[in-house]
Every structure is written in C-alpha cells, then in structure tokens.
Amino acid sequence: MSDFTIRLATAEDLEAIRAIYNYYVERSTCTYQVEPDTAAERAAWFRDRSAKYPATVAERDGAVIGWGALSPWKSRCGYAWSAEASVYIHHEHHRRGLGKALLLDLIARGRAAGLHTIIGATSSDQTASLALQVSVGFEVIGTHREVGRKFDRWLDVTYTQLMLAER
C-alpha cells in the first residue's frame, strides 16, 4: 500500500489521533491506559512534541489513518538521547504497511535529531507489534513480568531496542 503520505502532525490532527488511540484504550492491551484520552490531555501531549520527539501521521485522501511518535524514554537528563517509539494504526487499516512505514519514518527522524537509541515497550501479547519492531532491526532485550494490569489480567511488557548510533 503506497497510497498514503507521512507528515508531521498538526493541531488539526489531534482529534483523529485521539480517536485512533482511544479505540485501543477501550479494546486492547497495546496500551495500558484504561480511561480514554481527553482532548485536553492529547493537546498537552502535543505541546511536548519537538524535532527530537515528533508526532507524525499517515494520511490518505485527507484522512488520518495512523500515527506515530517519539517520546522521551525517561525524564532525567542522562536519558536525553534515548526515545520510546509509539505507533497506532486505525483499526480498519491493519496489515497494509502503515505501521512499518511510520516506524521507519520515526527511526529516520530520530537519527536526524541525533538520538542514540529508540526503545519499544510492548505488551508481550501484542505479537504483531513485536514482529514489526524486529523486522526493522529492533532487538528484544527483555521482558518485565506482570507489570501491567488491564481487563482483569496481569500483563508482561517486552522491551526492544534499536541502536541508532555506533558504539
């Protein structure tokens, strides 16, 4: 599928981003958030975006059908060159290459911004997400057991990592 474009997100995209994300909040373990995002919460999230930590969207025919973002891995200064990647695809547009395209775009943007590494933190039951990360070069680095809880069950988180800079 190549009939979409990826671009930096704008404030006008926030409602579509929020709708895509909230679909998964209510139905999936791909996020451990249990209450839907509000418009104010998503706007605050967007204010924290920058060249180093961008938000992007995949758009087709003027509609946002997926989004991705790089976010600070941790808040302490020593982690300033590490980021966490997030990618969410509209539920009607899976398995069309959007996730891979968005993740590859985030990797390129992270490299251009001088990041050293990108981390993925994925619910271990989200095998398609983990396979996507591995397919573009992320390595599985470990699993934290039963650190999340959603839908009345304990969930593991698998961490992946892609080194952007040579060691």
Image (cartoon, rainbow, N blue to C red):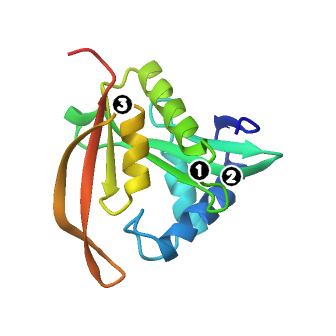
Q: Farthest residue toward the bottom? A: 152
Which residue type carries mark 2? Answer: Ile
Give the residue displayed 38% in from the left and 56% down from the top. Answer: 127
Q: Measure the alpha-carbon separation of dots 3 and 1.
A: 19 Å
**Residue 74 shows in this picture:** no
Tag 1: amino acid: Arg
Using the image, tell me which numbered label, if any, was put on residue 95: 1
Q: Which quarter of the figure has residue 134?
A: top left
Check disc 3 and report the residue beneath it.
137
Q: Is residue 97 above or below residue 64?
A: above
For the residue carrying disc 1, how many other residues have a C-alpha within 10 Å: few (<14), some (14-19), or many (20+)? few
Quarter containing the N terminus: top right
SS of the residue under disc 2:
strand
For the residues bearing labels 2 and 1, Cβ distance under 8 angstroms: no
In the structure shown, which secondary structural element does the residue marked by tag 3 occupy?
Answer: loop
User: Is 86 located above or below residue 145 in the figure?
Assistant: above
